């Protein structure tokens, strides 16, 4: 049960004044709430990105050169523009010592004369500008009598969405702040004193009713306190999950490695040293009576699948079945195409389970439950209730950041404490590994298998599009296979970016049937057919969206063109580039951008041009974009972080881990001190799944 103390924070935002159905939808969008209505808590965790700091000016002869000001004076003069003139409407405000012009464009005279009648005293706020040595305020924000005490001298500026103004959102958030209860403190008094942190309620007030703009900086005490709370909740949840997993005794697997040795004999190459090290660590885990919880991270093409297959074969020697879960059907089918033939040659049976496979599904489910299928490969379909295993010994989750911990636990629940191996082809900086995978041991594959060539990456303006198309024509005529990636499926009036369907029609005129189209809105059969035709073609260009980002493996594709590359994050660009360079041909990647480039976009493309190392790229991406984009949490539904920003708060992570260990050690001994505070913390930050793992729930 959620502590009753939290009820005001878990009330729906619709209960706040000024929030009707239309505004509620906008609040859900701006706060990133994917399911259910937005809550008061969601608004309080929607932090400002900056602030307008206003300066109270005592006399109009003391106006600064720039900045936002609050001034008071008498309306001295109106100067309306001539009819059909584009000149602005001017109002002169005078306080006896100086004057300021209030400037209005496209405004009705009657409205101005009513708001600012001649001879009236008005308090005005707005941004000061100077023109021909005259002070001006263009379209003042406030124009009221005696309004100085109503004006926010420091006004937070929030991330917005279309249809929702900062002023309206600010008013709603302040109403939410008035509902915030005082909660029991979960941080030790010594740590609070040392860090000079406010309480949670004080921190939220400092963010949403700031007394100075500096209070909104990520390095300021209020934000650091909130970031620490979120990191602490995460580390506590991970600690509870890990403790529970370790307590749930695994099985010490018995195997000789004979089947894995047969696999190595079949391969035309030897494993890299990094692969061998990973295999050694995994074998040690499998032979241990404790459950394996291991993260295997490696760059595109570093050979993670072979390491995973090695583990599958070892577990199979002991009679255990294995399940490999992938986030997309394309990736699941790719794994099946790679693993099934190798497994079959060693005498193991593999089956594919996806949401689309209806035919023969009953037979496959029966065979899996009877233990006649050794390896199940699939999507989310694997953890549906109808899927049962005879002895699930190993769970492998690919691209873990696209799944939540809850989904991981669902699949693990299909067996009796199966070992868990998580793989990701998005190299993750150390800070984020600890944040998201703090309950796991880590293996890294930093070497590329022998024969892999670096990809030659070039950057060009979209103004050279016709030249690029001619070069692609020449390459396709020579039998080359080319990916052409666009950011959208179809044309958009609001975004001036290339659409896959439009580009396909354009290239179809040049290449005819050798031009192919692939995007996420196509039916599964259509996508499979497009991929098969691309694989079989002697020369072709596949126009696609980012649906090809993971799981598409065509070894003889050697060129990729990424249009509007400035719109993609570094991790995504690197994943897309990894679609080529998978065979023995020299490969190239062309990043097309539309000028002018922002500084961030320029830096991003520079990093791509200079390195093929995914770990270097991940660190650069963290600095340039922050963790949300790096791990794709917004689009994937992973329970990411709203408040903690690793680029600013990375130093708090080890602090949060140490504090979590202290709390868990105290809780393990059965102490009730602080239990209610910890429950409040976990519920507040959406980690309530972990609460049932606490002693006595």
Image (spheres, rainbow, N blue to C red):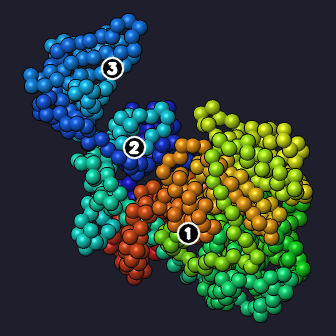
- What is the crowding at mark 2: few (fewer than 14 residues within 10 Å), some, or many (at least 20)? many
Q: Is residue 250 left or right of residue 128?
A: right
- What is the crowding at mark 3: few (fewer than 14 residues within 10 Å), some, or many (at least 20)? some
Q: Tag on residue 104?
A: 3
Q: Which residue is at 90% across, 55% downward? A: 537
Q: Is residue 539 left or right of residue 423?
A: right
Residue situated in front as seen by the camera: 539 or 433: 539
Residue situated in front as seen by the camera: 354 or 92: 92
| Outermost residue toward the bottom in this view | 256
Image coordinates for residue 418, horizontal then vertical, percent: 67, 78
Q: Tag on residue 616?
A: 1
SS state under label 3: strand
| Outermost residue toward the top in this view | 83
Given this view, does label 2 or label 1 mark the residue nearer the observer?
1
The answer to whether marks 3 and 2 mark residues whose Cβ atoms lie closer than 8 Å is no
Q: Which residue is at 56% across, 61% downward? A: 607
**Marks 1 and 3, Cα distance to the nearest angstrom?**
51 Å
Image coordinates for residue 483, horizontal then vertical, percent: 76, 53
SS state under label 1: helix
Image coordinates for residue 347, horizontal then vertical, percent: 89, 81
SS state under label 2: loop
Disc 2: which residue: 158
Q: Is residue 641 left or right of residue 316?
A: left
Given this view, does label 3 or label 2 mark the residue nearer the observer?
3
The answer to whether 622 is drawn above or below residue 421 in the figure is above
The answer to whether marks 2 and 1 mark residues whose Cβ atoms lie closer than 8 Å is no
């Amino acid at each position: 049960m959620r502590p009753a103390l939290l009820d005001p924070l878990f009330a729906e935002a619709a209960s706040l004044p000024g929030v009707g159905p239309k505004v509620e939808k906008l609040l859900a969008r701006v706060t990133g709430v994917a399911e259910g209505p937005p809550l008061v808590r969601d608004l309080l965790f929607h932090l400002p990105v900056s602030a307008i700091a206003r300066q109270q000016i005592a006399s109009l002869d003391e106006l600064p050169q720039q900045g936002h000001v609050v001034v008071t004076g008498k309306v001295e003069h109106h100067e309306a523009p001539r009819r059909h003139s584009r000149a602005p409407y001017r109002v002169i405000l005078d306080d006896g010592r100086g004057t300021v012009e209030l400037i209005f464009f496209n405004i009705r005279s009657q409205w101005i004369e009513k708001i600012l009648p001649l001879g009236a005293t008005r308090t005005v706020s707005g941004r000061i500008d100077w023109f021909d040595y005259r002070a001006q305020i263009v379209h003042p924000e406030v124009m009221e009598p005696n309004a100085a005490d109503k004006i926010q001298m420091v006004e937070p500026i929030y991330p917005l969405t279309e249809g929702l103004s900062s002023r309206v959102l600010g008013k709603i958030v302040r109403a939410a702040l008035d509902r915030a209860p005082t909660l029991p403190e979960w941080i030790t008094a010594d740590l609070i004193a040392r860090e000079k942190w406010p309480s949670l309620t004080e921190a939220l007030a400092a963010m949403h009713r700031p007394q100075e703009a500096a209070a909104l900086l990520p390095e300021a005490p209020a934000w650091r306190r909130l970031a620490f709370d979120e990191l602490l909740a995460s580390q506590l949840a991970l600690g509870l999950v890990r403790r529970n997993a370790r307590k749930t005794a695994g099985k010490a697997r018995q195997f000789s490695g004979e089947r894995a040795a047969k696999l190595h004999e079949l391969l035309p190459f030897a494993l890299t040293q990094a692969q061998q090290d990973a295999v050694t660590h995994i074998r040690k885990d499998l032979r241990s009576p404790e459950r394996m919880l291991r993260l295997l991270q490696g760059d595109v093409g570093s050979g993670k699948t072979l390491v995973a297959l090695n583990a599958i074969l070892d577990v199979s020697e002991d009679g255990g079945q294995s399940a490999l879960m992938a986030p997309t059907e394309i990736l699941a089918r790719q794994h099946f195409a790679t693993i099934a033939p190798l497994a079959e040659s060693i005498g193991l049976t593999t089956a594919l389970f996806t949401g689309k496979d209806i035919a023969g599904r009953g037979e496959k489910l029966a065979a899996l439950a009877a233990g006649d299928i050794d390896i199940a490969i699939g999507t989310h379909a694997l953890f549906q209730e109808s899927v049962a295993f005879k002895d699930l010994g190993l769970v492998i989750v690919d691209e873990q950041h696209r799944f939540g911990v809850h989904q991981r636990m669902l699949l693990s629940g299909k067996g009796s404490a199966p070992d868990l191996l998580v793989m990701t082809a998005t190299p993750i900086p150390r800070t984020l590994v600890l944040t998201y995978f703090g309950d796991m041991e880590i293996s890294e594959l930093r070497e590329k298998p022998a024969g892999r060539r670096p990809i030659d990456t070039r950057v060009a303006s979209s103004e050279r599009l016709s030249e690029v198309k001619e070069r692609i024509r020449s390459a396709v005529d020579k039998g080359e296979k080319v990916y052409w990636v666009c950011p959208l499926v179809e044309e958009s009036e609001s975004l001036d970016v290339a659409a896959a369907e439009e580009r396909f029609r354009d290239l179809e005129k040049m290449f005819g049937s050798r031009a192919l189209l692939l995007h996420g809105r196509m039916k599964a059969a259509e996508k499979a057919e497009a991929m098969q035709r691309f694989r079989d073609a002697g020369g072709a260009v596949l126009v696609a969206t980012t649906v090809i980002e993971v799981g598409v493996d065509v070894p003889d594709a050697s060129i990729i063109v990424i249009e509007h590359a400035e719109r993609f994050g570094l991790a995504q660009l690197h994943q897309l580039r990894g679609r080529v360079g998978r065979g023995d041909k020299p490969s190239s990647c062309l990043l097309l951008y539309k000028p002018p480039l922002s500084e961030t976009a320029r830096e991003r493309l520079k990093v791509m041009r200079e390195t093929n190392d995914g770990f270097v790229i991940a660190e650069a991406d963290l600095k340039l974009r922050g963790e949300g984009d790096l791990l794709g949490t917004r689009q994937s539904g992973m329970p990411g972080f709203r408040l903690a920003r690793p680029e600013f708060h990375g130093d708090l992570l080890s602090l949060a881990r140490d504090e979590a260990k202290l709390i868990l050690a105290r809780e393990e001994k059965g102490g009730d001190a602080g239990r209610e505070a910890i429950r409040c913390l976990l519920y507040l930050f959406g980690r309530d799944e972990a609460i049932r793992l606490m002693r006595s729930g």
